[in-house]
Image: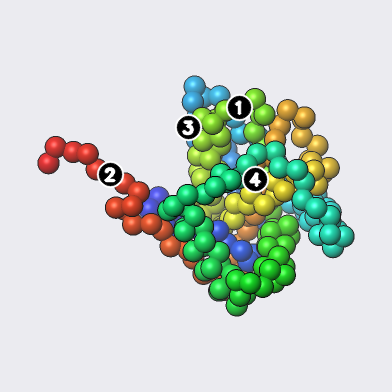
Amino acid sequence: MDVYEAVTSRRAVRGFSDRHVPREVLDRVLSAAAWSPSGSNIQPWHAYVLTGGPLAEVKKRAGDRLAAGDPWDEPEYEQYPLVLKSPYRERRSAFGEQRYGALGIAREDLEARQRAASANWDCFGAPAALFCYIDRDMGPAQWADVGMYLQTVMLLLRAEGLHSCPQMAWAKFHRTVAEVVSPPDELMLFCGMSIGFEDVAVSDARTGRASLDETVTFVDGL
């Protein structure tokens, strides 16, 4: 698989089979991802990879919290601006309509939307998950470094025939993850990432992208 195919075939998969992901594949992906760029090579990412019993325990604890109606954890960072302006507001709205529309869930059916969202905390059935932390002292540039690392991981997973789903939803249950992985206090959970082989029987519409004219300006001498 070449780089272009890896990029264009990568998407947030929300339905995984229980097929085992070999440890040597994860080792190979994460060893290569270590070459991701970062300012002054400080490499600000901290990844915890869970499979088997530990991942099952995280899923169980998250499921127990959902069943008990426990509130989400206090956010440690803002995922979106309080006021999301155009065109970002419209893009986010379009994503929600497409995502839940593909599941046959009406916009006003908040209960069904919550049920669908709860699949996040089962990692959509994935047998492996990565939880990415960043030091609390890091700034915006280092958060960008972490994003480049995660993208590299996802593209390498595609090269191995695997899929993934990056999930900021796990930041809402950061205490639950910490109970299992025991990160140092100075680390903050940025996101989780479900990893595995796609369950092709699960309907999963892919969201579109803005046109080149919307996001790119060429300044040249032609």
- Choose between 142 and 217: the one closer to the eye: 217
Residue 189: give x, y in percent of width and height: 69, 40
178 to 107, vertically: above or below: above
Which quadrant of the figure contains the N terminus? bottom left
Decide if residue 7 is on the left or right side of residue 47: left
The residue indicated by pointer 3 is 37
Which quadrant of the figure contains the C terminus? top left
Residue drawn where x is 31% and y is 46% of the image: 216
The residue indicated by pointer 4 is 191
Which is more N-terminal, label 4 or label 1?
Answer: 1
Give the amino acid type for the residue marked by disc 1 in the picture: Met
Residue drawn where x is 61% and y is 27% of the image: 138
Decide if residue 177 is on the left or right side of residue 46: right
The residue indicated by pointer 2 is 217
Which is more N-terminal, label 3 or label 2?
Answer: 3
Q: How many marks?
A: 4
Q: Which secondary structure lies at badge 3?
A: loop
Q: Which secondary structure lies at badge 2?
A: loop
Residue 181: give x, y in percent of width and height: 78, 40
Q: Is residue 141 visible?
A: yes
**Residue 138, labelled with which disc?**
1
Q: Which secondary structure lies at badge 1?
A: loop
Which is more N-terminal, label 3 or label 4?
Answer: 3
When asked about the image quadrant of residue 174, the answer is top right
Mark 4 vs 3: CB contact within 8 A: no
Mark 3 vs 1: CB contact within 8 A: no
Q: Is residue 60 visible?
A: no
Mark 1 vs 4: CB contact within 8 A: no
Residue 128: give x, y in percent of width and height: 69, 53
Give the amino acid type for the residue marked by disc 2 in the picture: Thr
Which is more N-terminal, label 4 or label 2?
Answer: 4
